[in-house]
Image: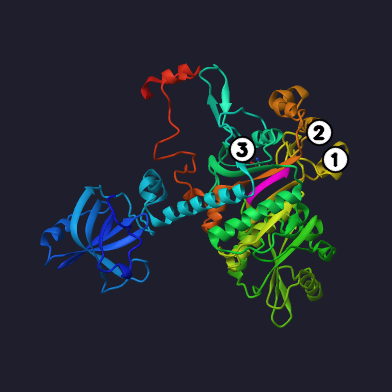
Amino acid sequence: MLRSHTCGELHLGHVGTPVHLSGWVQRSRDLGGMTFVDLRDRYGITQLVFNMDTRPDLCAQARRLGREFVISVRGSVAERSNKNLRIPTGEIEILVEELQVLNASKVPPFTIEDETDGGDDLRMKYRYLDLRRALVRNNLMLRHRMAIATRNYLNQEGFIEVETPVLIKSTPEGARDFVVPSRMNPGEFYALPQSPQTFKQLLMVSGFDKYFQIVKCFRDEDLRADRQPEFTQIDCEMAFVDQDDILSTFEGLARHLFRQVKGVEIGDFPRMTYAEAMRRFGSDKPDLRFGMEFTELTPLTRGKDFKVFDEAALVVGICAPGCAEYTRKQLDELTDFVRRPQIGAKGLVYVRCQADDTFKSSVDKFYTEEDLRNWAATSGARAGDLLLILAGEPNPTRKALNELRLEMGNRLGLRDRESFAPLWVIDFPLLEWDEDTRRFYAMHHPFTSPRREDIPLLDTDPAQVRANAYDLVINGVEIGGGSIRIHDRDLQKRMFSILGFTDEDAQAQFGFLMNAFEYGAPPHGGVAFGFDRWCALFGGADSIRDFIAFPKNNAGRDVMIDSPAPISQEQLDELSIGIRRSSSNG
Ligand code: ASP
């Protein structure tokens, strides 16, 4: 070994010990008779001292070291006179007796510090340097601890990790597939899995009982801050279970991860139906770290000649605690916020519930003080609070108010990253109607079982059928979701027909699964968690990107290896892909 210790472990107890350390030069400082070098490795930073009086040769050598040079030193541990109590090794330093440069380094394109001067693009291009920064490294270490803790828990619960194939078949449901041409089967393509869904179900038919896999999944979607074309799921499936069994097993996983990785004992996991979540929060992933629940004011606002409210199918508000004194400017900001095209509200009505028990609103022309008092009482508003009210079509209005609620939560500091509020959202609708294509789509996926008591509605009113499906939501983030599956061939066939498949199409696409259901398929269900997202949540970040070692940028590119990239004409020909490459690019 080129070291006896790491750069993160020496302390006062080691004073006088001879040591051998290796690492990267973080920075160096010349102070006349002394040169100080901060030596960094994965474990921390240790200060090296070179003394001009005792070792002028070494000191001169140290002064020639550049940032990110790889060096190895021998010396002894000494107590520092100028202690830095912010780092674990801050009370000691190494009096260097021998210095060896293992490799020089060019000046890095950005500083390898927590507060780096490198922009996103540069950091991505030189990701291997970015990964030297403690911040990013810590994220990956958190990810590692999450993966180990997940495997430990599931192993202990009797789950078996099974790898499923990466070259599979494209299917029309769900997101867009990434496809891979097959050289040996000209004109035919594999697809990369969007999830191992059908394979894990087949494993249940095989009798594996409890399966999991920490697995890469691929979706060719437009990217957002929290999306990557390839991402990782904790994918799980169990046989002979009902919804309760699944929820309690994976509540166990969540508790275990909170305890092992965050040191947090988590309280209850409330269960809320989709309908209730939409009514109370306008969202199927409500952030329960704070209240500000919706109050419906429709009947109270009718018949006072305020056209906007009279014509609206829904008038709904939230009560922002302690915000009655918001300035004109703050209220204008909120109005602009809800009018943004992504949110789409036409306007915002406010009522100030003033300290002297009077009310002031943006609709004083239409409503009496008594009306406003009534709204406030219904909303549970108290003196000092501010009512914020939106009106319009129910779904878009609820969605817009959800955004406003989250915005108010941010403004009021109610969304603390170190507090955690999990819940299960259950009873999602099975189907979603799409006006453009005039057909139903499965809200979760076509293998999700309807709730048993709703099966008769499949024939009469499919839109009302509830799915035996559930999502785990933490702090307003969908961390995972799953369902009890259909395990009966006829019901699965019926489901495909409701989704607009002909029998032939269904057989061609999913015949393998429906055939398997004829050979003793046990009742089964499962769930998949977004592993990157869960890591980001635990790491206190919004974006998953810094929890992935080598992520893609917003255009789906890896700018470090410069991919995707053209391939040669020979490769294209070999794959029977009829693209002619122009001679200018090869
Ligand atoms: N395969 C599903 C998904 O990726 C999760 C599940 O139903 O288990 O969303």
Q: Say few, some or many: other residues with alpha carbon within 10 Å of mark 3 (under 14 / 14 to 19 / 20 or more).
A: many
Amino acid type at image mark 2: Leu
- Quarter holding ligand 1: top right
Is 115 within the magenta? Answer: no
Name the residue tied to disc 2. Answer: 491
- Would residue 580 be seen by someone viewing this image from the given angle? yes
Which one is in front, 536 or 517? 517
- N-terminal of the pair, mark 3 or mark 2, is 3
Judge from the rendering whether residue 304 lies leftward or rightward of residue 345; answer left or right: right
Where is residue 191 drawn, in percent x and y?
58, 29
Can residue 344 be seen by looking at this rendering?
no
Q: Position of residue 562 (x, y in %)?
A: 40, 36
User: Residue 176 vs residue 523: left or right?
Assistant: left
Q: Could you tell me residue 3's position as x and y percent?
A: 28, 54
Query: Which residue is nearer to you in this view: 289 or 11?
Result: 11
Query: Mark 1 or mark 2, which is nearer the start of the sequence?
Result: 1
Task: Determine which residue is flagged by label 1.
Answer: 455
Say whether mark 2 is within 8 Å of ligand 1. no
